[in-house]
Image (spheres, rainbow, N blue to C red):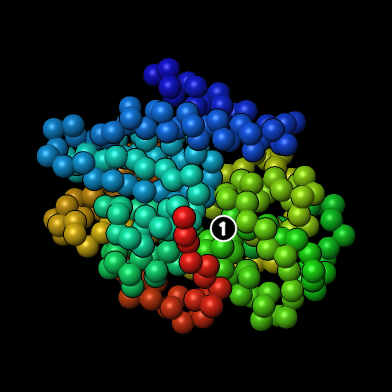
Amino acid sequence: MISNLIFKTMNQSCLGLAHLRQLRIIQYFCWMLVACLNAEAACLGDKSAPLIYSVYIVPQLTSTQTYTSWTPLLQEIGIASRQCFELVITPTVPDFEIALLSGKPDFAFMNPYHLVMAHNAQGYVPLIADGSVKLDGFIVVRADSPITSLQDLNAMRIAFPSPNAFAASLLIRAMLAKEKIDIQAVYVKSHSNVYRSVILGDVQAGGGVNYTLSREPIEVQSMLRILYTSQEYMGHPFAANPRIPIRTRTLISNSFLNLKKNNEGKKMLDAAQIVAPVLVDYERDYARLEQLGLEDFVVPSSR
């Protein structure tokens, strides 16, 4: 498909280290292209299904990366579960949060603390998450930075993808406050932007997570050094709005689980950061996040 070729080409451009300062401009046009082509993917899966379920993906990465990763996956899950999905990619994490906390998405892939917020606000139910590795947050600096300790970050500019990113922002900012380290938080909309802001020297450090850094080009990874790593937690869940029938939730969960049984399915899951899906439960896997005291660092999203 021509659109897929366009996305592949633009994605490579977005990742080119030789043009890091052009990345922000390119990402804007990438987003506009995604918006235009979303109409093409109005139904991913079984086109004879009576309903179209919206699937919102938290924008950790660029819009092109999210689109190219999730389109084939939802197509396959939709066919297997006999459902029709509409992929929705919001421009920013706050836009995602506004939609999520108002109960707009039928399904959503979100960070663990988003689930806490959405569960309490709308009753969202986690279905599956990646069971291959736990999620941890960290602080990165340039590989050649003189910064060697957390105390060196005092009064420094630190980039975060968004205020309410769980491991890349909330955990990090709460830890720094506990250590009485004052920082200037800069929110740059995506994990990709965090890493590049650090490399370019726009900020002295940045918050990220193992899932996203490991997917960056080796050139990007080699220019960064991890200064601090948080505890581990269950990763991002794919969750359902409670209005979705239990039978439908089960069909979709099973489709995710079955997809890991073949090589093509494994590739799709890996691209979407759900390498080895497992069933998850709110009380068992996520409720303990309510005890971390992160609510004091949550920034309410507004338009």
* Secondary structure at numbered mark 1: loop
Left/right placement of residue 86 relative to residue 11 reads left
Left/right placement of residue 59 relative to residue 118 reads right
Kind of residue at disc 1: Ser
Q: Residue at the spot x=42%, y=33% of the render?
A: 35
The image shows residue 172 at horizontal and vertical percentages of 63, 69
Q: Nearer the viewer, residue 182 or 77?
A: 182
Q: Residue at the spot x=53%, y=61% of the render?
A: 165
**43 vs 260: above or below:** above
Which quadrant of the view contains residue 116? Answer: bottom left
The image shows residue 168 at horizontal and vertical percentages of 59, 61
Left/right placement of residue 27 relative to residue 112 reads right
The image shows residue 106 at horizontal and vertical percentages of 26, 52
Q: Nearer the viewer, residue 268 or 161?
A: 161
Q: Look at the image and tell me whether residue 76 can be seen.
A: no
Left/right placement of residue 8 relative to residue 42 reads right
Q: Residue at the spot x=57%, y=35% of the render?
A: 28
**Residue most extreme to the right:** 146
Task: Name the quadrant of the N terminus.
Answer: top left
| Mark 1 surroundings: few (<14), some (14-19) or many (≥20) residues within 10 A | many
Q: Look at the image and tell me whether residue 294 can be seen.
A: yes
The image shows residue 191 at horizontal and vertical percentages of 59, 50
Please name the residue that numbered disc 1 is placed on. Answer: 162
Q: Residue at the spot x=49%, y=39% of the render?
A: 63
Q: Nearer the viewer, residue 259 or 189?
A: 189
Which quadrant of the view contains residue 72? Answer: top left
